[in-house]
Image (cartoon, helix red, strand yellow):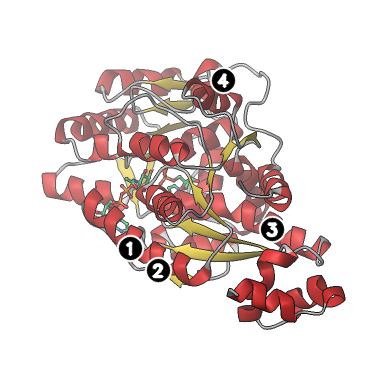
Amino acid sequence: MDGYTDAWERADAGERRKSGIFIESVVIREIRGFIEIMKIADIVGARPQFIKVAPVLRAIQRHNETHPENPIQEVLVHTGQHYDYEMSGVFFDDLGLKPPDYHLGVGSGTHGYQTGEMLKRIEEVLLAEKPDVVMVYGDTNSTLAGALAAAKLRIPVAHVEAGLRSFNKRMAEEINRVLTDHISDLLFCPTQTAVENLRREGITQGVYLVGDVMYDAALQYLALAEQKSRILERLGLKPKDYALATVHRAENADDPQRLRAIFAGLEAIAQTGLPVILPLHPRTCKQAESLGLSLNGVRVLEPVSYLDMLLLEKNARVILTDSGGVQKEAFFFRVPCVTLREETEWVETVETGWNVLVGCDRERILGAALAAQSGVESAWPYGDGKAGEKITRVLEGWEGE
Ligand code: UD1
Ligand code: UDP
Protein backbone atom coordinates (compact mmCIF):
# COMPACT_ATOMS: atom_id res chain seq x y z
CA MET A 1 0.00 0.00 0.00
CA ASP A 2 1.57 3.39 -0.91
CA GLY A 3 1.66 6.39 1.42
CA TYR A 4 -1.36 8.03 -0.13
CA THR A 5 -3.59 4.94 0.05
CA ASP A 6 -2.46 4.14 3.54
CA ALA A 7 -3.25 7.63 4.79
CA TRP A 8 -6.59 7.58 2.99
CA GLU A 9 -7.52 4.25 4.55
CA ARG A 10 -6.67 5.60 7.97
CA ALA A 11 -8.69 8.79 7.61
CA ASP A 12 -12.29 8.75 8.80
CA ALA A 13 -14.45 9.16 5.70
CA GLY A 14 -16.55 12.02 7.04
CA GLU A 15 -13.52 13.93 8.22
CA ARG A 16 -11.28 13.49 5.18
CA ARG A 17 -11.79 16.79 3.43
CA LYS A 18 -12.00 18.81 6.63
CA SER A 19 -9.07 17.27 8.47
CA GLY A 20 -6.77 17.40 5.48
CA ILE A 21 -6.80 21.16 5.59
CA PHE A 22 -5.80 21.60 9.18
CA ILE A 23 -3.51 18.76 10.06
CA GLU A 24 0.24 18.98 10.01
CA SER A 25 1.63 19.68 6.54
CA VAL A 26 3.42 16.37 6.01
CA VAL A 27 0.12 14.53 6.49
CA ILE A 28 -1.67 17.02 4.22
CA ARG A 29 0.75 16.03 1.51
CA GLU A 30 0.13 12.34 2.11
CA ILE A 31 -3.59 12.54 1.64
CA ARG A 32 -4.01 15.62 -0.49
CA GLY A 33 -4.35 13.54 -3.65
CA PHE A 34 -7.64 12.22 -2.30
CA ILE A 35 -9.04 15.31 -0.67
CA GLU A 36 -8.25 17.48 -3.64
CA ILE A 37 -5.95 20.02 -2.07
CA MET A 38 -4.10 21.31 -5.09
CA LYS A 39 -0.44 22.05 -4.49
CA ILE A 40 1.44 24.22 -6.92
CA ALA A 41 5.10 25.19 -7.12
CA ASP A 42 5.86 28.61 -8.62
CA ILE A 43 9.31 28.90 -10.19
CA VAL A 44 10.69 32.44 -10.49
CA GLY A 45 14.15 33.94 -10.59
CA ALA A 46 14.42 37.06 -12.79
CA ARG A 47 13.08 40.57 -12.19
CA PRO A 48 9.98 40.43 -14.42
CA GLN A 49 8.97 37.09 -12.89
CA PHE A 50 8.58 38.55 -9.40
CA ILE A 51 6.11 40.98 -10.95
CA LYS A 52 4.28 38.27 -12.94
CA VAL A 53 3.87 35.92 -9.98
CA ALA A 54 2.44 38.62 -7.68
CA PRO A 55 -1.12 38.74 -9.16
CA VAL A 56 -1.27 34.93 -9.22
CA LEU A 57 -0.23 34.64 -5.57
CA ARG A 58 -2.69 37.33 -4.64
CA ALA A 59 -5.52 35.55 -6.47
CA ILE A 60 -4.64 32.25 -4.78
CA GLN A 61 -4.66 33.97 -1.39
CA ARG A 62 -8.13 35.38 -2.14
CA HIS A 63 -9.30 31.98 -3.31
CA ASN A 64 -8.08 30.41 -0.05
CA GLU A 65 -9.90 33.05 1.99
CA THR A 66 -13.17 32.57 0.11
CA HIS A 67 -12.91 28.78 -0.37
CA PRO A 68 -11.32 27.48 2.85
CA GLU A 69 -12.82 24.07 2.13
CA ASN A 70 -10.86 23.80 -1.14
CA PRO A 71 -7.52 25.53 -0.63
CA ILE A 72 -4.61 25.77 -3.04
CA GLN A 73 -1.25 25.26 -1.37
CA GLU A 74 1.66 27.00 -3.03
CA VAL A 75 5.42 26.79 -2.76
CA LEU A 76 7.51 29.70 -4.03
CA VAL A 77 10.87 28.75 -5.53
CA HIS A 78 13.46 31.45 -6.38
CA THR A 79 16.22 30.11 -8.64
CA GLY A 80 18.57 32.99 -7.75
CA GLN A 81 19.01 34.01 -11.40
CA HIS A 82 18.79 37.62 -10.24
CA TYR A 83 20.29 38.34 -6.84
CA ASP A 84 21.26 42.02 -6.35
CA TYR A 85 18.84 43.74 -4.01
CA GLU A 86 17.83 46.11 -6.86
CA MET A 87 17.08 43.12 -9.15
CA SER A 88 15.34 40.86 -6.64
CA GLY A 89 14.80 41.81 -2.97
CA VAL A 90 13.28 45.20 -3.76
CA PHE A 91 10.48 43.48 -5.71
CA PHE A 92 9.61 41.24 -2.78
CA ASP A 93 9.41 44.38 -0.64
CA ASP A 94 7.45 46.51 -3.15
CA LEU A 95 5.03 43.77 -4.13
CA GLY A 96 4.57 42.48 -0.58
CA LEU A 97 5.59 38.96 -1.61
CA LYS A 98 6.30 36.37 1.05
CA PRO A 99 9.95 35.29 1.13
CA PRO A 100 10.61 32.32 -1.17
CA ASP A 101 10.12 28.89 0.39
CA TYR A 102 13.26 27.80 -1.45
CA HIS A 103 16.12 30.01 -2.63
CA LEU A 104 18.34 28.00 -4.93
CA GLY A 105 21.14 30.58 -5.22
CA VAL A 106 22.11 29.66 -8.78
CA GLY A 107 23.36 33.13 -9.80
CA SER A 108 24.93 34.12 -13.12
CA GLY A 109 26.79 32.06 -15.69
CA THR A 110 26.67 30.76 -19.23
CA HIS A 111 23.30 29.52 -20.48
CA GLY A 112 24.37 25.90 -20.05
CA TYR A 113 25.74 26.38 -16.56
CA GLN A 114 22.84 28.50 -15.34
CA THR A 115 20.07 26.37 -16.83
CA GLY A 116 21.78 23.13 -15.83
CA GLU A 117 22.28 24.18 -12.20
CA MET A 118 18.67 25.31 -12.03
CA LEU A 119 17.47 22.03 -13.48
CA LYS A 120 19.33 20.01 -10.83
CA ARG A 121 18.26 22.16 -7.92
CA ILE A 122 14.62 22.54 -9.02
CA GLU A 123 14.38 18.79 -9.45
CA GLU A 124 15.42 18.28 -5.82
CA VAL A 125 12.69 20.65 -4.66
CA LEU A 126 10.06 18.99 -6.82
CA LEU A 127 11.01 15.54 -5.57
CA ALA A 128 10.69 16.75 -1.99
CA GLU A 129 7.51 18.79 -2.45
CA LYS A 130 5.62 16.64 -4.99
CA PRO A 131 3.48 19.47 -6.36
CA ASP A 132 0.46 18.75 -8.55
CA VAL A 133 1.41 21.52 -10.97
CA VAL A 134 4.56 23.55 -11.61
CA MET A 135 3.92 27.13 -12.70
CA VAL A 136 6.53 28.93 -14.79
CA TYR A 137 6.45 32.52 -16.00
CA GLY A 138 7.65 34.27 -19.15
CA ASP A 139 10.71 33.26 -21.12
CA THR A 140 13.89 33.26 -19.04
CA ASN A 141 16.30 30.45 -18.26
CA SER A 142 14.41 30.00 -14.96
CA THR A 143 11.24 29.39 -17.00
CA LEU A 144 12.79 26.70 -19.16
CA ALA A 145 14.59 24.99 -16.26
CA GLY A 146 11.39 24.88 -14.19
CA ALA A 147 9.34 23.48 -17.06
CA LEU A 148 11.95 20.90 -18.03
CA ALA A 149 12.53 19.68 -14.46
CA ALA A 150 8.78 19.23 -13.98
CA ALA A 151 8.07 17.63 -17.36
CA LYS A 152 10.81 15.02 -16.86
CA LEU A 153 9.26 14.13 -13.49
CA ARG A 154 5.87 13.98 -15.21
CA ILE A 155 4.54 16.82 -13.15
CA PRO A 156 2.10 18.95 -15.19
CA VAL A 157 3.50 22.31 -16.26
CA ALA A 158 1.50 25.54 -16.41
CA HIS A 159 3.06 28.33 -18.46
CA VAL A 160 1.98 31.88 -17.69
CA GLU A 161 2.58 34.13 -20.71
CA ALA A 162 2.40 31.24 -23.15
CA GLY A 163 2.31 31.65 -26.93
CA LEU A 164 4.50 34.73 -27.27
CA ARG A 165 6.76 34.67 -30.31
CA SER A 166 9.35 37.03 -31.76
CA PHE A 167 10.09 34.52 -34.57
CA ASN A 168 13.77 35.24 -33.95
CA LYS A 169 15.41 32.02 -32.88
CA ARG A 170 18.69 33.78 -32.17
CA MET A 171 17.12 35.13 -28.98
CA ALA A 172 17.60 32.88 -25.95
CA GLU A 173 14.10 33.92 -24.85
CA GLU A 174 12.51 32.60 -28.05
CA ILE A 175 14.13 29.19 -27.49
CA ASN A 176 12.91 29.22 -23.89
CA ARG A 177 9.35 30.12 -24.90
CA VAL A 178 8.99 27.61 -27.70
CA LEU A 179 10.41 24.72 -25.66
CA THR A 180 8.39 25.61 -22.57
CA ASP A 181 5.13 25.85 -24.52
CA HIS A 182 5.72 22.48 -26.14
CA ILE A 183 6.09 20.69 -22.78
CA SER A 184 3.32 22.58 -20.97
CA ASP A 185 -0.05 21.09 -20.06
CA LEU A 186 -1.72 24.40 -19.22
CA LEU A 187 -0.93 27.41 -21.39
CA PHE A 188 -2.12 30.74 -20.06
CA CYS A 189 -2.05 33.22 -22.94
CA PRO A 190 -2.02 36.99 -22.47
CA THR A 191 -3.45 37.79 -25.91
CA GLN A 192 -5.43 36.35 -28.80
CA THR A 193 -2.26 36.60 -30.91
CA ALA A 194 -0.54 34.24 -28.47
CA VAL A 195 -3.42 31.74 -28.77
CA GLU A 196 -3.08 31.84 -32.55
CA ASN A 197 0.70 31.39 -32.41
CA LEU A 198 0.16 28.22 -30.40
CA ARG A 199 -2.51 26.96 -32.75
CA ARG A 200 -0.12 27.36 -35.69
CA GLU A 201 2.32 25.10 -33.82
CA GLY A 202 -0.40 22.52 -33.24
CA ILE A 203 -0.99 23.38 -29.56
CA THR A 204 -4.70 23.66 -28.82
CA GLN A 205 -5.23 21.52 -25.71
CA GLY A 206 -5.01 23.24 -22.31
CA VAL A 207 -4.84 26.72 -23.87
CA TYR A 208 -6.59 29.52 -21.94
CA LEU A 209 -6.82 33.17 -22.95
CA VAL A 210 -6.65 34.87 -19.54
CA GLY A 211 -5.12 38.29 -20.26
CA ASP A 212 -1.80 39.68 -19.16
CA VAL A 213 -0.67 39.25 -15.54
CA MET A 214 1.56 42.32 -15.95
CA TYR A 215 -1.56 44.35 -16.61
CA ASP A 216 -3.07 42.97 -13.40
CA ALA A 217 0.10 44.01 -11.59
CA ALA A 218 0.21 47.51 -13.09
CA LEU A 219 -3.42 48.10 -12.08
CA GLN A 220 -2.91 46.66 -8.61
CA TYR A 221 0.28 48.57 -7.77
CA LEU A 222 -0.16 51.94 -9.48
CA ALA A 223 -2.15 53.45 -6.60
CA LEU A 224 0.50 52.26 -4.15
CA ALA A 225 3.22 53.72 -6.37
CA GLU A 226 1.44 57.08 -6.47
CA GLN A 227 1.13 57.04 -2.71
CA LYS A 228 4.65 55.89 -1.85
CA SER A 229 7.09 56.76 -4.62
CA ARG A 230 8.95 60.09 -4.49
CA ILE A 231 11.08 59.36 -7.55
CA LEU A 232 9.95 62.38 -9.60
CA GLU A 233 10.71 64.79 -6.76
CA ARG A 234 13.98 63.01 -5.99
CA LEU A 235 15.14 63.38 -9.60
CA GLY A 236 13.60 66.85 -10.04
CA LEU A 237 11.47 65.69 -12.98
CA LYS A 238 8.32 67.28 -14.33
CA PRO A 239 5.57 65.04 -15.72
CA LYS A 240 5.75 64.61 -19.50
CA ASP A 241 9.06 66.46 -19.63
CA TYR A 242 11.57 63.61 -19.81
CA ALA A 243 12.33 60.43 -21.70
CA LEU A 244 12.71 57.14 -19.83
CA ALA A 245 15.00 54.45 -21.25
CA THR A 246 16.00 50.87 -20.41
CA VAL A 247 18.47 48.63 -22.24
CA HIS A 248 19.33 45.09 -21.20
CA ARG A 249 18.60 42.61 -24.01
CA ALA A 250 21.73 40.47 -24.62
CA GLU A 251 21.49 41.19 -28.38
CA ASN A 252 22.01 44.88 -27.59
CA ALA A 253 24.09 44.91 -24.42
CA ASP A 254 26.59 42.29 -25.57
CA ASP A 255 27.09 43.72 -29.06
CA PRO A 256 29.49 46.70 -28.82
CA GLN A 257 28.37 48.19 -32.11
CA ARG A 258 24.69 48.08 -31.23
CA LEU A 259 25.26 49.34 -27.69
CA ARG A 260 27.39 52.25 -28.95
CA ALA A 261 24.66 53.22 -31.43
CA ILE A 262 21.91 53.03 -28.80
CA PHE A 263 23.92 55.13 -26.34
CA ALA A 264 24.62 57.64 -29.16
CA GLY A 265 20.87 57.86 -29.80
CA LEU A 266 20.15 58.49 -26.10
CA GLU A 267 22.91 61.12 -25.92
CA ALA A 268 21.43 62.84 -29.00
CA ILE A 269 18.00 63.02 -27.32
CA ALA A 270 19.54 64.50 -24.17
CA GLN A 271 21.33 67.10 -26.32
CA THR A 272 17.96 68.41 -27.53
CA GLY A 273 17.26 69.44 -23.93
CA LEU A 274 14.86 66.60 -23.07
CA PRO A 275 16.19 64.88 -19.93
CA VAL A 276 16.86 61.16 -20.48
CA ILE A 277 16.57 58.88 -17.43
CA LEU A 278 18.26 55.48 -17.77
CA PRO A 279 17.93 52.98 -14.91
CA LEU A 280 20.60 50.59 -16.08
CA HIS A 281 20.50 46.79 -15.88
CA PRO A 282 23.73 45.30 -14.43
CA ARG A 283 24.45 43.40 -17.68
CA THR A 284 24.50 46.67 -19.64
CA CYS A 285 26.34 48.55 -16.92
CA LYS A 286 29.17 46.00 -16.92
CA GLN A 287 29.42 46.03 -20.72
CA ALA A 288 29.40 49.83 -20.92
CA GLU A 289 32.15 50.03 -18.29
CA SER A 290 34.31 47.45 -20.02
CA LEU A 291 33.90 49.23 -23.37
CA GLY A 292 34.46 52.63 -21.75
CA LEU A 293 31.25 53.98 -23.33
CA SER A 294 30.10 57.48 -22.51
CA LEU A 295 26.56 58.66 -21.91
CA ASN A 296 26.98 62.42 -21.91
CA GLY A 297 23.94 64.23 -20.60
CA VAL A 298 22.03 61.01 -19.85
CA ARG A 299 21.07 60.45 -16.21
CA VAL A 300 22.15 56.90 -15.47
CA LEU A 301 20.63 55.27 -12.37
CA GLU A 302 20.88 51.92 -10.65
CA PRO A 303 17.85 49.75 -11.53
CA VAL A 304 14.86 51.29 -9.78
CA SER A 305 12.14 49.61 -7.72
CA TYR A 306 8.87 48.53 -9.36
CA LEU A 307 6.88 51.30 -7.69
CA ASP A 308 9.40 53.94 -8.82
CA MET A 309 9.41 52.42 -12.31
CA LEU A 310 5.61 52.58 -12.62
CA LEU A 311 5.66 56.28 -11.78
CA LEU A 312 8.59 57.00 -14.07
CA GLU A 313 6.79 55.23 -16.91
CA LYS A 314 3.40 56.81 -16.37
CA ASN A 315 4.82 60.33 -16.34
CA ALA A 316 7.34 59.98 -19.18
CA ARG A 317 6.84 61.82 -22.45
CA VAL A 318 8.34 58.90 -24.32
CA ILE A 319 9.84 55.53 -23.35
CA LEU A 320 12.78 53.94 -25.18
CA THR A 321 13.38 50.29 -24.37
CA ASP A 322 14.29 46.80 -25.46
CA SER A 323 12.36 45.26 -22.58
CA GLY A 324 9.21 43.23 -23.22
CA GLY A 325 7.58 44.29 -19.96
CA VAL A 326 8.41 47.97 -20.35
CA GLN A 327 6.94 48.09 -23.90
CA LYS A 328 3.67 46.85 -22.49
CA GLU A 329 3.68 49.12 -19.48
CA ALA A 330 4.17 52.08 -21.84
CA PHE A 331 1.04 50.88 -23.65
CA PHE A 332 -0.89 50.41 -20.38
CA PHE A 333 -0.13 54.02 -19.44
CA ARG A 334 -0.67 55.35 -22.95
CA VAL A 335 2.89 56.58 -23.27
CA PRO A 336 4.47 56.43 -26.76
CA CYS A 337 7.21 53.81 -26.95
CA VAL A 338 10.32 53.49 -29.12
CA THR A 339 11.57 49.92 -29.15
CA LEU A 340 15.29 49.36 -29.59
CA ARG A 341 14.81 46.08 -31.44
CA GLU A 342 13.88 44.90 -34.93
CA GLU A 343 10.88 42.85 -33.83
CA THR A 344 8.59 42.46 -30.85
CA GLU A 345 6.41 39.76 -29.34
CA TRP A 346 3.93 42.43 -28.25
CA VAL A 347 2.67 43.17 -31.75
CA GLU A 348 -0.53 44.87 -30.58
CA THR A 349 1.51 47.79 -29.22
CA VAL A 350 2.89 48.41 -32.72
CA GLU A 351 -0.34 47.72 -34.61
CA THR A 352 -2.14 50.38 -32.57
CA GLY A 353 0.57 52.94 -33.26
CA TRP A 354 1.78 53.28 -29.64
CA ASN A 355 5.10 51.61 -30.30
CA VAL A 356 7.65 51.90 -33.11
CA LEU A 357 10.50 49.48 -33.78
CA VAL A 358 13.71 51.33 -34.58
CA GLY A 359 16.50 48.83 -33.92
CA CYS A 360 19.78 50.46 -32.93
CA ASP A 361 20.32 53.27 -35.44
CA ARG A 362 21.24 56.61 -33.84
CA GLU A 363 19.21 58.76 -36.24
CA ARG A 364 16.14 56.54 -36.11
CA ILE A 365 16.22 56.51 -32.32
CA LEU A 366 16.47 60.30 -32.17
CA GLY A 367 13.86 60.84 -34.87
CA ALA A 368 11.36 58.44 -33.33
CA ALA A 369 11.79 59.89 -29.84
CA LEU A 370 11.22 63.45 -31.05
CA ALA A 371 8.28 62.47 -33.25
CA ALA A 372 6.69 60.17 -30.67
CA GLN A 373 2.97 60.59 -30.53
CA SER A 374 -0.14 58.83 -29.29
CA GLY A 375 -1.46 55.80 -31.08
CA VAL A 376 -5.08 54.96 -31.68
CA GLU A 377 -7.55 53.88 -29.01
CA SER A 378 -8.62 50.40 -29.97
CA ALA A 379 -9.96 47.19 -28.48
CA TRP A 380 -7.91 46.40 -25.37
CA PRO A 381 -5.71 43.38 -26.16
CA TYR A 382 -4.38 42.60 -22.66
CA GLY A 383 -7.45 41.44 -20.76
CA ASP A 384 -9.42 42.95 -17.91
CA GLY A 385 -6.81 42.96 -15.14
CA LYS A 386 -8.12 39.67 -13.74
CA ALA A 387 -5.68 37.23 -15.32
CA GLY A 388 -4.55 36.04 -11.86
CA GLU A 389 -8.14 35.14 -10.88
CA LYS A 390 -8.76 33.38 -14.20
CA ILE A 391 -5.60 31.31 -13.80
CA THR A 392 -6.65 30.37 -10.27
CA ARG A 393 -10.11 29.31 -11.46
CA VAL A 394 -8.60 27.06 -14.11
CA LEU A 395 -6.20 25.51 -11.57
CA GLU A 396 -9.02 25.01 -9.09
CA GLY A 397 -11.16 23.08 -11.56
CA TRP A 398 -8.35 21.24 -13.31
CA GLU A 399 -8.42 17.47 -12.95
CA GLY A 400 -5.03 16.83 -14.53
CA GLU A 401 -4.40 14.73 -17.58
C1 UD1 B 1 17.40 37.73 -18.04
C2 UD1 B 1 16.57 36.98 -19.08
C3 UD1 B 1 15.85 37.96 -19.96
C4 UD1 B 1 15.03 38.95 -19.15
C5 UD1 B 1 15.92 39.60 -18.09
C6 UD1 B 1 15.07 40.45 -17.19
C7 UD1 B 1 17.51 34.83 -19.80
C8 UD1 B 1 18.23 34.11 -20.89
N1 UD1 B 1 17.44 36.17 -19.93
O1 UD1 B 1 18.38 38.47 -18.75
O2 UD1 B 1 14.96 37.27 -20.80
O3 UD1 B 1 14.52 39.93 -20.00
O4 UD1 B 1 16.55 38.59 -17.30
O5 UD1 B 1 15.80 41.42 -16.53
O6 UD1 B 1 17.05 34.22 -18.88
N2 UD1 B 1 23.65 40.46 -13.06
C9 UD1 B 1 24.02 41.10 -11.89
N3 UD1 B 1 23.16 41.04 -10.85
C10 UD1 B 1 21.98 40.38 -10.88
C11 UD1 B 1 21.63 39.72 -12.06
C12 UD1 B 1 22.46 39.77 -13.14
O7 UD1 B 1 25.07 41.71 -11.82
O8 UD1 B 1 21.25 40.37 -9.85
C13 UD1 B 1 24.54 40.55 -14.22
C14 UD1 B 1 25.55 39.40 -14.30
O9 UD1 B 1 26.75 39.94 -14.78
C15 UD1 B 1 24.94 38.50 -15.33
C16 UD1 B 1 24.23 39.48 -16.25
O10 UD1 B 1 23.76 40.51 -15.42
O11 UD1 B 1 25.89 37.72 -16.00
C17 UD1 B 1 23.07 38.88 -17.02
O12 UD1 B 1 22.12 38.26 -16.12
P1 UD1 B 1 21.21 37.05 -16.63
O13 UD1 B 1 20.24 36.71 -15.57
O14 UD1 B 1 22.06 35.97 -17.16
O15 UD1 B 1 20.49 37.65 -17.89
P2 UD1 B 1 19.67 39.00 -18.02
O16 UD1 B 1 20.34 39.88 -19.00
O17 UD1 B 1 19.36 39.55 -16.69
N1 UDP C 1 11.59 47.34 -14.03
C1 UDP C 1 11.81 47.89 -12.78
N2 UDP C 1 12.94 48.64 -12.59
C2 UDP C 1 13.84 48.90 -13.57
C3 UDP C 1 13.59 48.34 -14.86
C4 UDP C 1 12.46 47.56 -15.06
O1 UDP C 1 11.01 47.70 -11.86
O2 UDP C 1 14.83 49.58 -13.32
C5 UDP C 1 10.39 46.52 -14.23
C6 UDP C 1 9.49 47.01 -15.33
O3 UDP C 1 8.58 47.98 -14.83
C7 UDP C 1 8.79 45.75 -15.78
C8 UDP C 1 9.85 44.70 -15.58
O4 UDP C 1 10.80 45.24 -14.67
O5 UDP C 1 7.70 45.45 -14.96
C9 UDP C 1 10.50 44.37 -16.88
O6 UDP C 1 11.63 43.59 -16.66
P1 UDP C 1 12.87 43.56 -17.65
O7 UDP C 1 12.89 44.75 -18.50
O8 UDP C 1 14.06 43.31 -16.80
O9 UDP C 1 12.61 42.21 -18.47
P2 UDP C 1 11.70 41.81 -19.71
O10 UDP C 1 10.32 42.30 -19.46
O11 UDP C 1 12.32 42.37 -20.94
O12 UDP C 1 11.81 40.33 -19.73
* Secondary structure state at the residue bearing disc 2: helix
Between disc 4 and disc 2, whose residue precedes?
2
* Secondary structure state at the residue bearing disc 3: helix
Residue type pointed to by label 4: Ser
Q: Position of residue 207 (x, y in %)?
A: 60, 34
Location of mark 4 (residue): 374
Location of mark 2 (residue): 124
> What is the crowding at mark 2: few (fewer than 14 residues within 10 Å), some, or many (at least 20)?
few
Between disc 3 and disc 2, whose residue precedes?
3
Between disc 1 and disc 3, whose residue precedes?
3
Q: CA distance from mark 1 to mark 2?
A: 7 Å
Depth-wise, is mark 3 or mark 4 nearer the camera?
A: 3
Task: Identify which residue, 75 or 52, lies in the foreground.
Answer: 75
Left or right: residue 239 compared with residue 300: right
Location of mark 1 (residue): 120
Residue 394 shows in this picture: yes
Q: CA distance from mark 3 to mark 2?
A: 24 Å
Q: Are the two marked residues, 1 and 2, in contact with CB atoms closer than 8 angstroms?
A: yes
* Secondary structure state at the residue bearing disc 4: loop
Q: CA distance from mark 4 to mark 2?
A: 49 Å
Between disc 4 and disc 1, whose residue precedes?
1
Residue type pointed to by label 1: Lys
Location of mark 3 (residue): 60
Residue 39 location, quadrant: bottom right
Residue located 69% across and 45% down the image: 394
Compared with 218, 334 (above or below) is above
